Amino acid sequence: MLRLIFLLTICGFLGLFFISPTGFDHILAWACLFVMYGLITMALSRPHAIRFGHYSYINLEVLFLFLSYVIFFLPYQMTIIGVSDTYSIQKFRVTYPEGSNRALIVSTISMLSFCFGLRLVPRPFPKQSHPLFTQINSVTVVVVIVLLLLLMTAFVTFGGLSFFSGEYVRRTQVGTLGSQLLSVTTLVAMIASAIFVLQLVSGSLRKGGLLCGSLAIGWATSLLILGDRNHLLLVALPVIAGVAFYRRNIGLAGLALMMVLTWNLYVVVEFARKQDTRGLATLFAATLTEREDTPIWESSLTNSTTVTRVGINAVPTQFNFGYGKYLAIGASGVVPFLRGQIWGNDPFAGSSSINTYLLNGPNASWGVGTTLVADVYMDFGIIGVPVSFLLLGAFGGWVTRRAILYPERLEVQALLLVTTALFAQLPRYSLGLPIRYIVWTLLIFWGCRILARLIRSITDPPASRTSSAHPAE
């Protein structure tokens, strides 16, 4: 019955998309908000249980919906009730208010499809008898440590230190090599964080896991000084999710506390990175400085609200659909520097390029980025939105299901923690980001498994393997 309700609601909003007027209709907006509040309530009504007896409201569905609500719905809610005006607080030359109805409808379809896809994958109940993390591949731990050390060294060697000098600059203003190294190093640091917390909560923290945690903290501190809040949260969230899934029952109060602390960290880092000097002392001073902090619905997060409006409003009237081009370009980034070789210097090689052109002009000095909703719509059109978000939700359900079924496998649990961190930040990124990060994660795990078998074949003679397989009578 629930699946039928999801399907009918998605179809209803698809029809509404084609007949909705331009502008901002309050009745239509209330309908979209009502659906979003219903989805959040539904997510909070069934906390995740990955380990028997441990329930948590901190999970990939709740975190995904929370950030989506903040950037796709909250500014409109505040405008409706008269608390704020989302069209007057933007720093862009245009705000595209005429695209509000369509942006809300597409966002609602996206959230419905994501939650529908998540529920298409049955979630089993964890069994009490299942052991936790008994299969720990030491080769994986060593490879992650070595990789992270090499990447951090390469980041410093190839000009990464320049990121920390002067005022904060966006990644689009730095070299391609530095940007690539920043992304890959962050991903490996996420895996290191996951390994550390998994060993910690299982009570079997070893030297390798401790070193993984130390290196991840070092990289997170660098990101904190750099002012890169999004990548900092990507490294920190696996630890938070690991504690929530396997050690502590996190209720609604714990979820609310995490949200408040995260927002305060977000504000402090934004304030500190505008200062002339960088460092932990600057961050500490920022926490003590009296600031006139703007509320979350008037913060820089609302830039993503405008970006979503402009993307949906500009396609296909000003730009054609990508027809999968933007996803292909993003996915080709799995191999570093391959995108430039295949696609060349296309000025509109992604939805973020189009958004920047429309909002900041052809000579923009910084990029406005994109959002998941805008990126999918601009690439695949309105029909591609429910399909893409349904598949995305189904993938999240599949990762969660595997983690429940195989609690003894550290790699399976690490993939869940990495995916949870990605989904928590995904609404502000393009669809190509999770593909790159997930593929990199799987390649690391598969490579470590092959390497472990190779080492075992060398260190374990065939005779001993045969004798162990056929013991004497």
Image: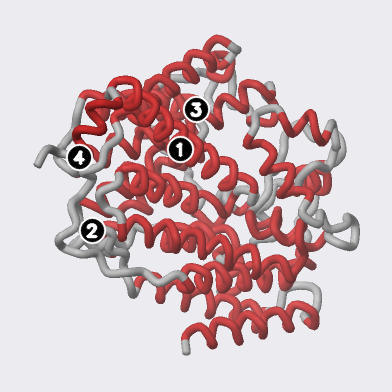
Residue under pointer 2: 51
Please name which of the two marks, 1 or 2, marks the residue nearer to the observer: 1
Residue 382, placed above or below residue 91: below
Looking at the rendered image, the quarter that the C terminus falls into is top left
Residue neighbourhood size for the residue with mark 3, other residues' Cα within 10 Å, grouped as few (<14), some (14–19), many (≥20): many
Which residue type does callout 3 highlight? Thr
Counting the numbered discs, the total is: 4
Residue under pointer 1: 446
Give the quarter of the image for residue 15.
bottom right
* Among the two numbered marks 3 and 2 on one chain, the one whose residue lies closer to the N terminus: 2
How far apart marks 1 and 4 lie (CA) works out to 29 Å
Tell me what residue is drawn at x 63 percent, y 67 percent.
107
Q: Secondary structure at mark 2?
A: loop
Please name which of the two marks, 3 or 2, marks the residue nearer to the observer: 2
Which residue type does callout 2 highlight? Arg
Q: Nearer the viewer, residue 443 or 161?
A: 443
* Among the two numbered marks 1 and 4 on one chain, the one whose residue lies closer to the N terminus: 1
Residue under pointer 4: 470
Residue neighbourhood size for the residue with mark 1, other residues' Cα within 10 Å, grouped as few (<14), some (14–19), many (≥20): some
Residue under pointer 3: 185
Horizontal and vertical percent position of residue 216: 37, 28
* Among the two numbered marks 3 and 4 on one chain, the one whose residue lies closer to the N terminus: 3
Q: Is residue 266 visible?
A: yes
* Among the two numbered marks 1 and 2 on one chain, the one whose residue lies closer to the N terminus: 2
Residue neighbourhood size for the residue with mark 4, other residues' Cα within 10 Å, grouped as few (<14), some (14–19), many (≥20): few
Please name which of the two marks, 4 or 2, marks the residue nearer to the observer: 4
Q: Nearer the viewer, residue 50 or 366?
A: 50
Q: Secondary structure at mark 1?
A: helix
